[in-house]
Image (cartoon, rainbow, N blue to C red):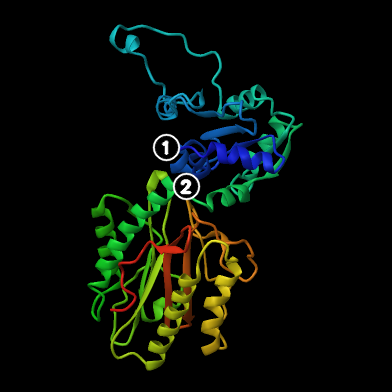
Amino acid sequence: MQPKEGKIKELLRRNGLDGAIVSSPENFHYVTGFAGHQHTVSRQPGFSVAVVSAREDVPTQLTTMDFEVPTFEKKSAGRFLVRKYDTWVGVKTWDEIARGAVLPAPAVMESSMDVLKQMVKEMDLADKKLGLELDYLTLGYYNGLCQAFPDAKYENISDLFVFARSVKTPEEIEMFRTLCRAADAGFTAVSQIAKPGVSEREMVQTFRQTVIATGAAAPSAWSMFSTGESGSRLTIPGDAVIQPGDVVKFDAGVNAEFDFYTTDTSRSWVMDGADPALYRLKDRLYEGQRRMIAAAKPGLPICDLYHIACDYVKDAYPSYRRGHQGHSISMGPATAEAPYINAATQRPLEAGMVLAMEVPCYIGGVNGFNIEDMVLITEDGCEVLTPNTPHYL
């Protein structure tokens, strides 16, 4: 992926910030275009760090463990200054192994925080206004930064990254197309086996195997496939078996692993023999979602989308209440992020947004519904990125 460093620099300047310490794996990737291995696996702050200046003439600096520095240098291709900190890995030279050379041990083992201090000072940011991802950092790490840079002024930039990620670049859009094709293949395979006698575990296994076979994505671990009563609550697939008259629901996605991008899609299928009230509810939810998709275009206030879906369902079901009817989606770790399709979001839709548009309804102890598609806002309307999986069997 291409770095989004320039986009972040612009937003730092717009928000009156001199620089930023980028700590989370996903936003490190957003800035640089690649991820740190151990950083991604552990999600611990400090394993890899990017320091970004708001000034265009000051290069971004990165630090990572000594064992990973060659990888970062290869991926950076000279764009970023990569600095190592010392670890227990102990990489040897060829002379040491082949010729018995004995090289002196380093006098001091420099930690990630030691190198970060050097980077921030070299970039003239130690006493400036710095952005931090306070929604990600642990209290201990934040206190360490305050001790390291007592003269800096800090501001939370977690929302700044969410805002930046809400409008996708052409490369990101192609990433979503690829992921959604893999998800669509998995969901369509499930639609072909969903019938009485099939278990939740069989459905999720079919989904996972199909997605993996595409070679384009990994199934999200949180993916939920449910039937009957289990669809009315938050749960992972269990031992339940589809019965005649059940609602079969899934809420699931795929992800790009070390590229972080993720998807979120839902379907609800009513099995033969169900109470007629369930068929009527499904039709109303589906039509509400279709109306929302049909109206989506650049310039439309997001709150209008909410009312198009919610008010339509509420006209038939006065008890219907929803906090939102969908959300933006990008790199996780959460699938749902701002802007949310709710009654308060007046931000207009923009070309390049990718939204999960959903119209759910859950009936406690009985059944659950969710109708959800990934939708790309285009220059003159929108495009459904998950079109192949049927809404009706």
- Name the residue rendered at 25%, 53% in the picture: 214
SS under mark 2 = loop
Label 2 environment density (alpha carbons within 10 Å; few <14, some 14–19, many ≥20)? some
Label 1 environment density (alpha carbons within 10 Å; few <14, some 14–19, many ≥20)? some
Q: Residue furthest front?
A: 380
Q: Quadrant of the C terminus?
A: bottom left
Q: Dot 1 corresponds to which residue?
A: 37
Q: Position of residue 344 (x, y in %)?
A: 65, 68
Relative to 151, 392 lies left or right: left
Q: In the rendered view, tell whether residue 11 sits above or below residue 203.
A: above
CB atoms at circles 1 and 2 under 8 Å apart? no
* Residue sitting nearer the eye, 214 or 195: 214
Q: Earlier in the sequence, mark 1 or mark 2?
A: 1
* Residue sitting nearer the eye, 193 or 238: 193
Tell me the distance, in whole angstroms, between the alpha carbons under discs 1 and 2: 24 Å
Q: Tell me the quarter of the picture where residue 198 sits.
A: bottom left
